[in-house]
Image (tube, rainbow, N blue to C red):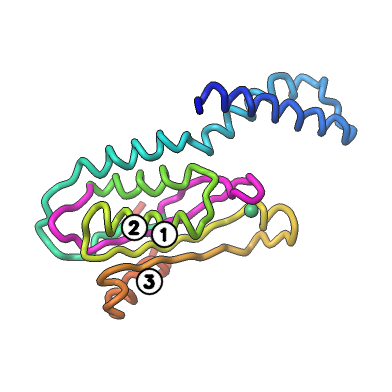
Amino acid sequence: MTKEKATEYMNVGFENIVKGIGELGYDINDDNFKGTDERAARGFLQMVLPKKEVEAGIDAMLKKTFPAKYKEMVISKHNVAFGVCPHHLLPVVYRISMAYIPKDKVLGLSKLSRLAKLLARGPVLQEDLTHDLCDILHQRLGTEGAAVYVQGLHMCMAARGIGAHEARLVTNCVTGIFLDNMATRQEFIKLVTDNHPTLV
Ligand SMILES: [Zn+2]
């Protein structure tokens, strides 16, 4: 399991995809197709990071915490992240909002955003991404509860098949206080679904 081997496999894969495009009647000897196989493989490898790299990134982020001064909801909303779906290997654009109620430590705010972006960069199911992120914030960070709300624009739905380009897949996960306390859960849902104008 190495990145070199993965690159090798993907180069061959995209080389065949380009040949397939040629079979569809397109001129793959055109200059625009020069190096497309390797470029596409490099692009794909930015969408799907090595699992070990993702895990190491999560560990590193969870190591840098600060003492919690307050027990107020910490929220980071509308983070844009990218990945691919495991069923079609087509891109997915996510808008991820998450929150937690601290116990004794908090993560730096930019870390929340980075955590979501990092977890999305794999061939993961949106439901799993949502639950994994929620588990990390609740169990591994050690909080009173966490909530995650994810909207996904799936190219497999938008650009092919049923062509539902307006459809967004919505998943959410709540744990701890968010599960037990309806008011806290509703506050979170309201904060992430309200269409407030952005500051900048
Ligand atoms: Zn799909």
Residue bearing mark 3: 189
Placement of 51 over or under 150, stated as above or below: above
**Which image quadrant is residue 190 in?**
bottom left
102 within the magenta span: yes
**Which image quadrant is residue 75 in?**
bottom left
Q: Earlier in the sequence, mark 3 or mark 1?
A: 1
Placement of 60 over or under 8, stated as above or below: below
Placement of 110 over or under 14, stated as above or below: below
Q: Are marks 2 and 3 in contact (CB under 8 Å)?
A: no
Q: For mark 3, give the secondary structure.
A: helix
Alpha carbon distance from label 2 to label 1: 6 Å
Q: Which mark is residue 104?
A: none
Q: Which mark is residue 135?
A: 2
Name the amino acid, label 1: His
Q: For the point 37% across and 40% down, which residue is it?
A: 55
Q: Earlier in the sequence, mark 2 or mark 3?
A: 2
148 within the magenta span: no
Side (left or right) of 80 relative to 105: right
